[in-house]
């Protein structure tokens, strides 16, 4: 694979491509054109060709893309061939919902440990995941070699908990709290903000109607 830096927008579309290619492969399809792919994943074909071009010329004119080689390429790029354990910090309303969901559609990511300070739930198993006390966080994250966490604690303690996570060597935080947490540049934060997403949707609908807004 060429060592090009992939734009963020492209990286965000990779799982969408991957899921559809998986579906095609399961259905026994050997090849797919960028137009067909565009129709299915609702990303225009020029964007798809540009996205794919970052990985070198994977398609052939008049033939399209070979489903299985594309799939194995994406599997490697997205590390789908490897199981990643992540931890959840804060098992309240949102935390419970995420534990219950536990990324069932994906067989390469799962929440394998959760942490809280509420002694009513620590020491229990919720949706198949053990809930540890925060006092045991360092030990458990180290033993389980977890480098990524989902943060679902109240905003008021988000930075304090983040500092503890940085201290134990966490490398990635999926931040559901409304706080814009501060981390050293060795740690990556991805913010999830449903209000923001909804407002973006409303903005695009107002401005462009139902036309696709992904590209
Ligand atoms: N991003 C989104 O779209 C979205 C949607 C809903 C909620 N939220 C945010 O997610 C967070 C959780 O929301 P909720 O409704 O589940 O709250 P909640 O109060 O139900 O749950 C918070 C949990 O964190 C635990 N906690 C408190 N202090 C802690 C600490 N120091 N260490 C570990 N655990 C601790 C609590 O015991 C509780 O179980 C909030 O910050 C909320 O604003 C985000």
Image (cartoon, rainbow, N blue to C red):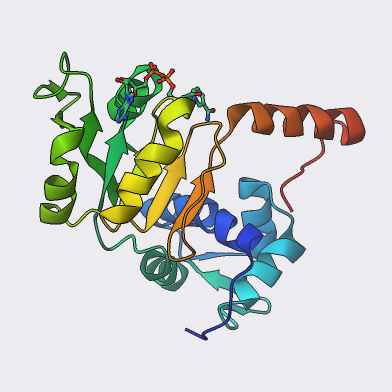
Position of residue 58 measured from the top left corner of the image (x, y, whole percent): 56, 78
| Picture mark count | 0
Please tell me whether residue 157 is drawn above or below residue 24 in the rendered image. above
The quadrant holding residue 171 is bottom left
Quick one: which residue is furthest to the bottom in this view? 2
Examine the rendered structure and indicate whether residue 56 appears above or below residue 179: below
Q: Seen from this angle, which residue lies furthest right?
A: 207
Q: Can you say whether 160 is above or below 29 in the image?
A: above
Task: Please name whichever residue, 63 or 138, is drawn nearer the observer in this view of the structure.
Answer: 138
| Residue 204 in which image quadrant | top right
Q: Position of residue 103 (x, y in %)?
A: 34, 38
Where is ligand 1, by quadrant? Answer: top left
Position of 134 with respect to 155 (left or right) is left
Compare residues 54 and 99 and report the one nearer the observer. Answer: 99
Can residue 27 be seen by looking at this rendering? no
Quadrant of the image for the C terminus?
A: bottom right
Residue 52 higher or lower than 215, as above or below = below
Residue 16 rendering spot, x and y as whole percentages: 53, 51
Residue 153 placement, left or right of 55: left
Looking at the image, the residue that sits furthest to the top is 120
Identified at 58% across, 83% down, the residue is 56
The image quadrant that residue 186 belongs to is bottom left
| Relative image position of residue 173 (x, y in whole percent) | 41, 48
Identify which residue is drawn at 76% across, 65% down.
46
Q: Is residue 48 visible?
A: yes
Residue occupying image coordinates x 37% and y 70%: 76
């Amino acid at each position: 694979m060429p060592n090009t830096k992939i734009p963020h927008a492209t990286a965000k579309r990779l799982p969408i491509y991957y899921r559809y290619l998986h579906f095609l492969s399961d259905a026994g399809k050997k090849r797919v054109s960028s137009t067909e792919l565009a129709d299915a994943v609702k990303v225009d074909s020029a964007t798809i060709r540009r996205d794919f071009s970052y990985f070198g010329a994977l398609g052939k004119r008049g033939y399209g893309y070979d489903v299985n080689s594309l799939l194995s390429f994406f599997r490697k790029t997205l590390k789908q061939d490897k199981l990643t354990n992540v931890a959840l910090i804060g098992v309240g309303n949102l935390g419970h919902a995420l534990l219950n969901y536990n990324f069932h559609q994906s067989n390469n990511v799962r929440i394998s440990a959760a942490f809280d300070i509420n002694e009513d739930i620590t020491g229990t198993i919720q949706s198949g995941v053990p809930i540890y006390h925060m006092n045991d966080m360092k030990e458990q994250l180290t033993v389980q070699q977890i480098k990524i966490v989902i943060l679902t604690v109240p905003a008021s303690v988000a930075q304090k908990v983040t500092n503890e996570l940085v201290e134990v060597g966490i490398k990635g935080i999926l931040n559901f709290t409304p706080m814009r947490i501060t981390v050293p540049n060795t740690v990556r934060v991805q913010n999830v903000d449903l209000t923001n997403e909804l407002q973006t949707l409303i903005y695009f609908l107002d401005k462009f109607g139902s036309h696709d807004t992904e590209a």
